[in-house]
Amino acid sequence: MNAELWKYRYYENDSMTIIREEEPEQLIRNKTTGKTTIEKIKRELRKSKTIEEHLDGASEQLKRLFENIDTRILQINDEIDRYTTNAEIVYKTSVNFVYLAIQKKNNTLRLLLRSQDGHLSDPKKITEPIPKTFGYGHITHQMHLSFKESENEEYINLILDLIFQSYSATQ
């Protein structure tokens, strides 16, 4: 997450200390002496999956579908960045606008899309709204795309139009 943790403490004389926590701490009780000490917990950073790791074990059709969608998203604009997390492949400009997850069991791609004011022009109703209670912010719509649907170029163009609307919501 690359987050920083700061600890603060107020004192009776209206003073306060602020300390940056570099590593989490835990209380350790020595069984023989009964004394309690504080020790830092060393944690290794979790490494994000690569695109190859996301695709590992996916069907050939799903891999081709991903490559097609990935290429077309990156062709929208040279300023689009792509990065990976352990769960998804994320496309962004100044903010994230598409989260793409490779769902091997369902043999589909799941796309989460950004919108302005919760609205995407989707006359064919191929997306589903994401409830605000899920806390995704401006990521308001999701869809699942199977390789069977991807054989229809008109359908792919509808998907790309929705992705372009999502990209435009970042401008």
Image: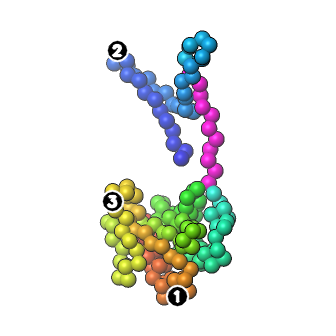
Task: Name the residue located 48 percent from the left edge and 61 percent from the top edge.
Answer: 96
Q: Secondary structure at mark 3?
A: helix
Query: Could you classify mark 2 by the number of other residues whose Cα lies within 10 Å: few (under 14), some (14-19), or many (20 or more)?
Result: few
Query: Could you classify mark 3 by the number of other residues whose Cα lies within 10 Å: few (under 14), some (14-19), or many (20 or more)?
Result: few
> Which of pointers 2 and 3 lies earlier in the amino acid sequence?
2
Residue situated in front as seen by the camera: 98 or 142: 142
Residue furthest to the top in view is 33
> Which of pointers 1 and 2 lies earlier in the amino acid sequence?
2
Number of marks present in the image shown: 3
Rendered position, 38 above or below 132: above
Task: Name the residue located 57 percent from the left edge and 22 percent from the top edge.
Answer: 28
What is the number of the mark on residue 13? 2
Circle nearer the viewer, 2 or 3: 3
For the residue marked with disc 2, what is the amino acid?
Answer: Asn
Residue situated in front as seen by the camera: 85 or 114: 85
Residue 30 position by quadrant? top right
Q: Residue under label 3, please give it.
A: 132
Q: Secondary structure at mark 2?
A: loop
> Which of pointers 3 and 1 lies earlier in the amino acid sequence?
3
Q: Secondary structure at mark 1?
A: loop
* Residue 9 placement (x, y as % from top left): 41, 23
Q: Which residues are magenta?
A: 38-48
Left or right position of 118 against 105: left
Is the magenta region chiefly helix, strand or loop? Answer: loop
* Residue 82 placement (x, y as % from top left): 58, 64
Q: Are marks 3 and 1 in contact (CB under 8 Å)?
A: no
Q: How is the image coloured?
A: rainbow
Q: CA distance from mark 3 to mark 1?
A: 32 Å
For the residue marked with disc 1, what is the amino acid?
Answer: Asn
What is the number of the mark on residue 152? 1
* Residue 15 placement (x, y as % from top left): 37, 19
Q: Does residue 79 appear anywhere in the picture?
A: no
